[in-house]
Image: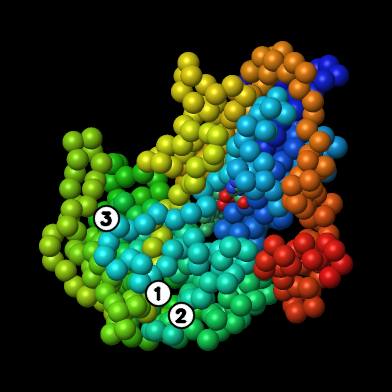
Amino acid sequence: MTSSPIDGPEPLRVAIVGAGPAGFYAADALLKAGAAVDVFELLPAPFGLLRYGVAPDHQNIKKAGVAFERTAKHPAFRYFGNVPVGTALSIDELRADYDQVLVAIGASTDRKLGIPGEDLAGSVAATSFVGWYNAHPDFVAEHFDLSAQRVVIVGMGNVAMDVTRLLVKSPDALAGTDIARDALSVLRQSRVREVVLLGRRGPAQAAFDQGELADIAELDGVEVVVEGAPVEEPNHEHSVGAKRNLEYLATLPRVPSGNAERVVRLWFCSAPSALVADDSGQRVRAIEIERTELVRRSDGSVSARGTGQKELLEAGMVVRSIGYQAKPLEGLPFDAKASVIPNFGGRVGRPGEALPGCYVVGWIKRGPVGLLGSNKQDARETVDAMLEDRDHALSSRGSRQPFRVLEGLRARGIRPVTYADWLEIDERERARGAEIGKIREKFATVAEMLAALDGA
Ligand SMILES: Cc1cc2nc3c(=O)[nH]c(=O)nc-3n(C[C@H](O)[C@H](O)[C@H](O)COP(=O)(O)OP(=O)(O)OC[C@H]3O[C@@H](n4cnc5c(N)ncnc54)[C@H](O)[C@@H]3O)c2cc1C
């Protein structure tokens, strides 16, 4: 269904919570349909995981930001960064002041393994590691010890591939990117020579995209080895992605040659069962791994079952990369199991019990999966629902006044960052980068970003 422009003098007034890709794709569709859009973002900087998730050596992906910058130039678009909805402003306040509220807050936290020893130092979440190398203000102060030879990563999705690549790639190849300065210097000192990735299931069920693994295998001095389970022949039951993975995995060695500078080992049919502490009792020293076997369920899907056969692998750091998880937002329902705000086609609630004027888009709508482009399609669905509901939204507007956002926020001690402010920060970051041969040198904390605006 195509969104049709709204005629008439009074535009639909929409508040979007979250300035990640999903929020921007939705803003673009809403603006094209004649709505006025105010975006409220937790951090001063927009673009969500495009800035703070996508790896620094994936600059071609980050170019998607150019389209978002175009959207932001629309005269009916306003941006208010540094405004955490849920604390600075409530959902109820937004609902009172806008015709519709669209929540696009993504999924910012990590899932736990639920095994003994998980809270030891050296047991870390991929969300923190990724946030750290991308200079996310919540993670810049983290410390990652890369002094041991081996790192184990639990999980084999694309995020695990990003983390692996950053650990085995030459730091010189990252130096010109927008990687966090501190992360680059820690990576320069790294003694990591081996990264072991654990996958509970077999090669046919692996979650990574073949191209992501090939990017690692093609790095100079790096060898990728497939262990733990045979690589089966692709057949008609396999998805296109699985076939591509199987064909590629079959070309990789089964044992390390001993000649590579760094080795990446893919251990299939291997699940973590405990983390083991060193003598201090505080730090991770090793990971206990249980071999699994594959079980076909009645619906045809394949699951993994522990065999009881266990082994211990020494590791200086264990990274859990088993998925992102969303946080609830006060004032809206939350489905913790699915890690989404319950919705149907983007309307918050359930059919027949929709929460009037409330919508969701992106990872908080569908769960934390999917590449950038999937959020565009998703935004179209939600915006279509919003436009279907617009007559109702406008007729129930009553005496509602447009929210005097800037004044209201300042009165609460919040310093909103406008889009013009962001462009200033952006320019400063690029200039700082240019001085040291980098695309950009990000400000690492919110305080630094705000100070840059105040001329510091
Ligand atoms: C590590 C990693 C690497 C990735 N690499 C790629 C890649 O190479 N290519 C690709 O196509 N896709 C990649 N993706 C996927 C892509 O980043 C996601 O599809 C996309 O970012 C999801 O968009 P979103 O807007 O739903 O969420 P997000 O990008 O998370 O945006 C949500 C925004 O909401 C804000 N927010 C959260 N809470 C609040 C609040 N209370 N108030 C106000 N604002 C709030 C956040 O600060 C954030 O800016 C990657 C994802 C990850 C995790």
Q: Nearer the viewer, residue 316 or 174?
A: 316
Above or below 422: residue 73: above
* Residue denoted by label 3: 201
| Marked residue nearer the N-terminal end (2 or 1) | 1
* Residue denoted by label 1: 122
* Residue denoted by label 2: 145
Q: Nearer the viewer, residue 408 or 8?
A: 408
What residue is rendered at 27% in x and 61% in y? 115
Q: Quadrant of the N terminus?
A: top right
**Label number found at residue 351:** none
In the image as oriented, which residue stretches furthest toward the left?
A: 308
Q: Position of residue 75 (x, y in %)?
A: 85, 37
In the rendered structure, are the residues bearing label 2 and label 3 in contact, judged by CB atoms less than 8 Å apart? no
Residue 132 sits in quarter: bottom right
Disc 2 beta carbon < 8 A from ligand 1? no
What residue is rendered at 30% in x and 79% in y? 281
